[in-house]
Image (cartoon, rainbow, N blue to C red):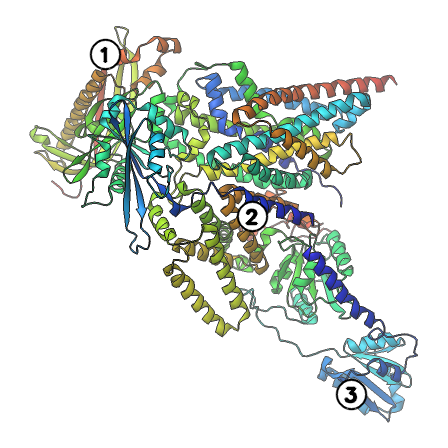
């Protein structure tokens, strides 16, 4: 009900600007192509720059902040200043100068970072796009200890360049799209031809083309518009800021989508297990990588079960507690006025509050939150008889375990499931717990990512892929690409002729 | 939308359904030890001990809540006792059943029934027969030790784990009670001045306690009863070569061979292979020299001899406590076994014990 | 999207998980009670019988060249015969599906929720079963892989029982002190039921014949688990103690103890929810597959909903575990007849059709 209401509000909100677009942003072809008309389209855009060269009878119209100053000076300003009128024709022969007849295209070109050159001979667009951008930095969210440290930034061109530098092959194909009626955000779809299955490529490009949403700001937002099941809590595409991840997935035959103005690229099809892998696994020795990977699955089980098992056991299954722990558990529980479910929910909520507060605050104040939270939770709550200290241990352990999971989106999903499991365990003990797990498994097995099964090496069972799923085998074992990508070239280092 | 409706329905059901079966930890009184004694008129005196974790206690101090009643059955006792405590009495954490020897001699299988029927009672609960009155022991405070129930509990667990006595829990007791080739046993404890001590093993015929194997024979019984993986025992004799000797890390293997004797009756040979390290030795022999084999032989003979004595007492009492019957049964055909009066046959069966003892080491003292 | 075919191995697990279920908890007692000493051995001949029965099913597949059983039936039988047959089968399957859940819930109620209504507990399982079925057989098979693996993960627990295991308790006697062998055979055969539902999987399986072997594999896994459990419990309890234990496997689980947790029988019994879920799901799904032949217009999910609703209402009648078990006995007998008779009928029809084709 609520979601439907929200949706309708959103669509109304979206329709309004669209109606405006039709006569402002999208230029009418009615008027002939002339400087006046173009300037008219940009009226009240005070950031537009208009230069005139009376000698050449030339006018240049552009957005200064979209242009690379250097490029602009050398490509446009210098030649125009130093040229005589007769030589102009020859200059305009250069492919740099593109003749444009259509006024709407001129407007578009200016918006895309070209300078529009109005000459008596006609209108020319000179591309000099190069706005101020963040430089290539290392990733804050997906840092690794060894391995390359460069990360994607908000510029599509930079990102493409980072990838091209790694995949030095003409097989790397890039498809271009624009998303959003006003924003026209550029989206690129990358794949390696003859490795990626074209079904996935086509399905992805269809979905991107069919996006009916006015403004997409980030890759993680784009995901929610192209997913197979929009209302699932699991992320159905992998997001990453790391070019090495993107490239390795390209090599596995997956499709990578890069969005302009977003540092995170999206990768599909993916499996639920990929959210438990980290590039670190591959940069460490394989035994270490395997250990880390198993550790993450253990963390996954812990974070899902620990608190809910505490609730189930203290509420229903007291006989499962070993004798040595019984006294201390009873003792710590005896001062708590709430039933275990409420106690656990209270603690989990506090923890979520802390996490959220820490995430929003600048890092220096964030530390303070950590200390305050630590003191409040660790000591005061127990002293005051608000919670039992065994629960504190359980909650803290499951929180730490949840940080071990590399993917932020996945750990968010797991947190929601954890809350559900706590409630279910509080209601029905082990039975409720298993009920919840059953729901999750049934739900998971239905999910697909770009039409490929989401739980693949486990169900459908593909034991050949287990060596890079549950463990990280040595590289000599990785001679085949994963089954999920259904690649035409399954052997990694050999292309079929 | 539909999914939302389903989930809401589930949630409502959850809320509506189930809260009366909750057993929240601090609101229940879990019995730690239940003691049963014979009471006049074939009744049962039940005493239970529930640890009470006091509220707002910093050092985790507990006291035991003790309740006692006389009734016809354990569950009747439980409902009578429930009226006297502020907590719900549950039996899921019972660690020890203590049975007074008067009740044990009267037979008490009828009272075991409820513990097998009630799914919350653990089959690992220890079965103990008390020399004396069970209720009295758990009502007693032993100031030199932890809380009585806990004290007994830990004591038993330690002894079981050390394998110095056979483990006697509800599982073993009921299993051996049902099986036709073995009789159940239970460990016995008694009060000794200010402490509690393990005093021996109670041997049963069906569910009636018949006799007691005294503590000094328990190690022999253990050797006969099971393969030891660890254990320790001490032997004292009058022989100057073997005044006293103690072993640790004893490993033993028992093999029972049943054969038909010349007269047509069945005979049993029990082969014991024992090895252990010497912990203490008082005697004239030098363990580092060839005299060691002499000592080994002496020990072997001593064990065989004493074991036969233990078996003879058992035979005399007609209690097949270490499961000889299973081996005889497996030797016979079914029809023959059915016709045999096993107890009768057991009491007259010739049993020989052959022990071979082997000294693994003799410690860090060289002589 | 093209319809994906069921993976061979998935079919094996599908068969395994449909067959095994709550019966695992009582199986040692059943064998001990009806066959007496060393009753676990009977599982092997029954397994061979089941294997023969599965061969009949594969014969249907081979002779019909993978045609759906409904196509075979409707090719030579008139509608007025088929309709009652379908309705009958639908009712049978739906009721079995319902009773499986009911039995599980009643045991659960006895163990942990003595005062909670079993209907409430049952609704939970039913909701789960419904959600499970409406994902379709392909997704069911995927989820079942995870369920089966979770269940099979318990096998290593058997190592813990070796310490208390004693071969001497098994006795050398064969089937002495048993009671009613015939009844026992029926019950054991009933324990293996579930394989017959592969008859309805023909259109969903791969087109080659290799998958038929995997039905045997699934059946083999079932036998292995059954043997493991019964053999262990014979040595763990001795057969006389087994007779007196309602759920020997629960008692065995109760014996387990770990440093941080003990008495995990409740937890492990809860894990069998997944087995129940799948068994019930497969029966309801088959019921749906049959009745959809009559009501072709109604969406199949609606059919599932109504058949579940109907069977749940009927399932309210038996109140106690004993009643449920006696109902089960009758349904097992009918199901037994079905699993033997139905493939024979199909083979007969196929033979007739083949001869008819030759003459025509």
Q: Nearer the viewer, mark 3 or mark 1?
A: 1
In percent of width and height, residue C19 lies at 58, 29
The residue wearing badge 2 is: A467
Q: Along the horizontal axis of the image, is B189 left or right of C30?
A: left
The residue wearing badge 1 is: B348
* Mark 1 to mark 2 CA distance (whole Å): 65 Å
B7 vs B264: above or below? below
Q: Say which quarter of the image contains residue C325.
A: top right
The earlier-in-sequence mark between 3 and 2 is 3
Q: Residues within 10 Å of mark 3 (few under 14, many from 20)?
A: few
- Do badges 3 and 1 share one subunit? no
Q: Residues within 10 Å of mark 1 (few under 14, many from 20)?
A: some
**Residue at 46 percent of width and 70 percent of height:** A367
* Mark 3 to mark 2 CA distance (whole Å): 59 Å
Q: Along the horizontal axis of the image, is A286 left or right of A163?
A: left
**Residue at 51 percent of width and 14 percent of height:** C181
Q: Say which quarter of the image contains residue B57.
A: bottom left
Regarding residue A204, the answer to whether it shows in the image is yes
The residue wearing badge 3 is: A77
């Amino acid at each position: 009900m609520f979601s439907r209401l929200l949706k309708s509000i959103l669509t109304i909100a979206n329709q309004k600007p669209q109606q405006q677009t039709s006569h402002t942003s999208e230029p009418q072809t009615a008027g002939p192509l002339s400087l006046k008309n173009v300037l008219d389209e940009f009226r009240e855009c005070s950031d537009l720059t208009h230069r005139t060269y009376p000698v050449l009878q030339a006018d240049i119209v552009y957005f200064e902040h979209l242009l690379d100053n250097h490029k602009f000076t050398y490509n446009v300003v210098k030649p125009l200043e130093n040229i005589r009128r007769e030589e102009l024709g020859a200059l305009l022969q250069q492919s740099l100068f593109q003749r444009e007849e259509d006024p709407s295209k001129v407007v578009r070109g200016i918006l895309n970072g070209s300078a529009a050159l109005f000459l008596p001979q006609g209108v020319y667009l000179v591309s000099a796009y190069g706005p101020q951008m963040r430089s290539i930095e290392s990733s804050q969210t997906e840092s690794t200890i060894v391995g390359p440290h460069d990360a994607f930034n908000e510029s599509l061109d930079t990102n493409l360049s980072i990838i091209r530098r790694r995949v030095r092959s003409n097989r790397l194909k890039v498809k271009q799209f624009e998303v959003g009626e006003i924003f026209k955000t550029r989206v690129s779809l990358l794949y390696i031809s003859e490795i990626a299955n074209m079904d996935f490529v086509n399905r992805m490009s269809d979905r991107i083309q069919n996006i009916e949403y006015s403004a997409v700001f980030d890759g993680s937002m784009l995901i929610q518009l192209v997913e197979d099941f929009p209302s699932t809590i699991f992320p159905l595409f992998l997001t990453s800021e790391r070019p090495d991840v993107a490239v390795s997935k390209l090599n596995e035959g997956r499709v990578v989508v890069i969005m302009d103005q977003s540092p995170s690229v999206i990768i599909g099809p993916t499996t639920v297990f990929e959210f438990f892998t980290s590039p670190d696994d591959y940069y460490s020795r394989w035994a270490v990588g395997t250990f880390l990977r198993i550790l993450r699955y253990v963390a996954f089980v812990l974070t899902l079960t620990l608190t809910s098992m505490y609730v189930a056991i203290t509420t229903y299954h007291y006989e499962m507690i070993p004798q040595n722990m019984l006294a201390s558990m009873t003792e710590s529980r005896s001062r708590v006025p709430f039933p275990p479910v409420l106690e656990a929910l209270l603690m989990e909520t506090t923890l979520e509050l802390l996490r959220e507060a820490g995430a929003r605050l600048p890092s220096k104040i964030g530390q303070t939150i950590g200390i305050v939270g630590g003191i409040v939770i660790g000591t005061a709550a127990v002293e005051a008889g608000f919670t039992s200290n065994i629960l504190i241990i359980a909650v803290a352990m499951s929180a730490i375990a949840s940080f071990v999971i590399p993917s932020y989106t996945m750990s968010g999903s797991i947190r929601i499931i954890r809350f559900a499991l706590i409630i279910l365990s509080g209601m029905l003990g082990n039975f409720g717990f298993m009920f919840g797990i059953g729901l999750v498994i049934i739900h998971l097995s239905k999910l697909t990512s770009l039409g490929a099964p989401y739980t693949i090496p486990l169900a459908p069972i593909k034991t050949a892929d287990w060596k890079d799923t549950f463990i990280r085998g040595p590289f000599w074992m990785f001679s085949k690409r994963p089954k999920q990508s259904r690649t035409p070239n399954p052997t990694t280092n050999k292309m079929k002729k | 939308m539909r999914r939302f409706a389903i989930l809401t329905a589930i949630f409502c059901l959850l809320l509506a359904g189930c809260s009366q079966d909750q057993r929240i930890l601090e609101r229940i009184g879990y019995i730690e030890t239940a003691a049963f004694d014979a009471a006049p008129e074939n009744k049962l005196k039940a005493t239970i001990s529930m640890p009470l974790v006091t509220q707002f206690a910093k050092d985790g101090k507990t006291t035991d809540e003790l309740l006692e009643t006389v009734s016809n059955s354990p569950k009747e006792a439980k409902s009578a006792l429930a009226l006297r405590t502020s907590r719900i009495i549950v039996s899921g954490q019972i660690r020890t059943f203590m049975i007074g020897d008067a009740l044990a001699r009267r037979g008490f299988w009828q009272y075991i029934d409820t513990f097998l029927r009630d799914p919350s009672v653990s089959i690992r609960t220890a079965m103990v027969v008390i020399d004396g009155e069970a209720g009295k022991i758990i009502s007693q405070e032993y100031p030199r030790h932890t809380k009585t129930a806990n004290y007994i509990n830990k004591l038993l667990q330690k002894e079981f784990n050390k394998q110095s006595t056979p483990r006697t829990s509800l599982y073993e007791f009921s299993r051996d009670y049902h099986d036709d080739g073995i009789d159940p046993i239970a460990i016995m404890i008694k009060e000794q001045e200010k402490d509690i001590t393990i005093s021996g093993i109670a041997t049963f015929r069906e569910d009636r306690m018949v006799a007691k194997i005294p503590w000094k024979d328990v190690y022999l019984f253990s050797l006969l009863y099971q393969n030891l993986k660890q254990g320790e025992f001490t032997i004292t004799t009058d022989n100057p070569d073997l005044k006293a000797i103690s072993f640790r890390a004893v490993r033993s293997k028992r093999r029972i061979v049943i054969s038909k004797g010349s007269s047509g009756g069945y005979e049993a040979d029990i082969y014991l292979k024992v090895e252990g390290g010497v912990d203490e030795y008082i005697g004239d022999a030098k363990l580092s020299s060839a005299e060691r084999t002499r000592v080994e032989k002496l020990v072997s003979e001593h064990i065989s001899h004493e074991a036969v004595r233990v078996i003879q007492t058992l035979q005399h009492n007609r209690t097949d406590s270490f499961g000889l019957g299973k081996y005889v049964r497996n030797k016979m055909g079914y029809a023959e076994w059915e016709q045999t009066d096993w107890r009768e046959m057991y009491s007259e069966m010739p049993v020989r014990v052959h022990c071979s003892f082997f000294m693994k080491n003799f410690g860090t003292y060289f002589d | 999207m093209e319809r994906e075919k069921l993976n061979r191995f998935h079919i094996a697990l599908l068969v395994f998980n449909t067959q095994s279920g709550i019966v695992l908890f009582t199986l040692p007692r059943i064998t001990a009670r009806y066959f007496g000493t060393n009753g676990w051995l009977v599982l092997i001949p029954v397994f061979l019988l089941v294997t023969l029965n599965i061969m009949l099913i594969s014969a249907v597949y081979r002779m019909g060249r993978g045609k759906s059983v409904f196509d075979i039936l409707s090719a030579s039988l008139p509608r007025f015969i088929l309709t009652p047959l379908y309705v009958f089968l639908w009712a049978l399957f739906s009721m079995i599906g319902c009773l499986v859940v009911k039995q599980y819930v009643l045991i659960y109620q006895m163990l942990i929720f003595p005062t909670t209504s079993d209907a409430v507990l049952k609704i939970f399982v039913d909701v789960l079963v419904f959600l499970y079925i409406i994902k379709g057989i392909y997704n069911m098979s995927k989820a079942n892989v995870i369920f089966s693996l979770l269940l099979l993960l318990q096998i290593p627990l058997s190592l813990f029982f070796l310490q208390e295991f004693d071969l001497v308790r098994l006795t050398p006697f064969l089937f002495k002190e048993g009671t009613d062998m015939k009844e026992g055979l029926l019950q054991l055969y009933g324990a293996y039921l579930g394989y017959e539902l592969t008859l309805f999987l023909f259109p969903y399986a791969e087109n080659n014949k290799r998958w038929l072997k995997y039905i045997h594999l699934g059946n083999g896994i079932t036998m292995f688990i059954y043997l493991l459990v019964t053999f262990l419990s014979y040595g763990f309890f001795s057969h006389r103690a087994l007779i007196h234990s309602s759920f020997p496997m629960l008692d065995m689980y109760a014996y387990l103890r770990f440093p941080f947790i003990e008495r995990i029988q409740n937890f492990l019994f809860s894990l069998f929810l997944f087995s129940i879920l799948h068994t019930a799901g497969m029966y309801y799904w088959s019921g749906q597959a049959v009745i959809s032949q009559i009501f072709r217009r109604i969406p199949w999910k609606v059919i599932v909903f109504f058949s579940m609703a109907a069977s749940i209402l009927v399932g309210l009648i038996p109140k106690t575990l004993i009643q449920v078990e006696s109902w089960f006995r009758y349904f097992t007998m009918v199901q037994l007849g079905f699993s033997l008779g139905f493939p024979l009928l199909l083979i007969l029809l196929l033979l007739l059709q083949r001869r008819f084709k030759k003459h025509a």
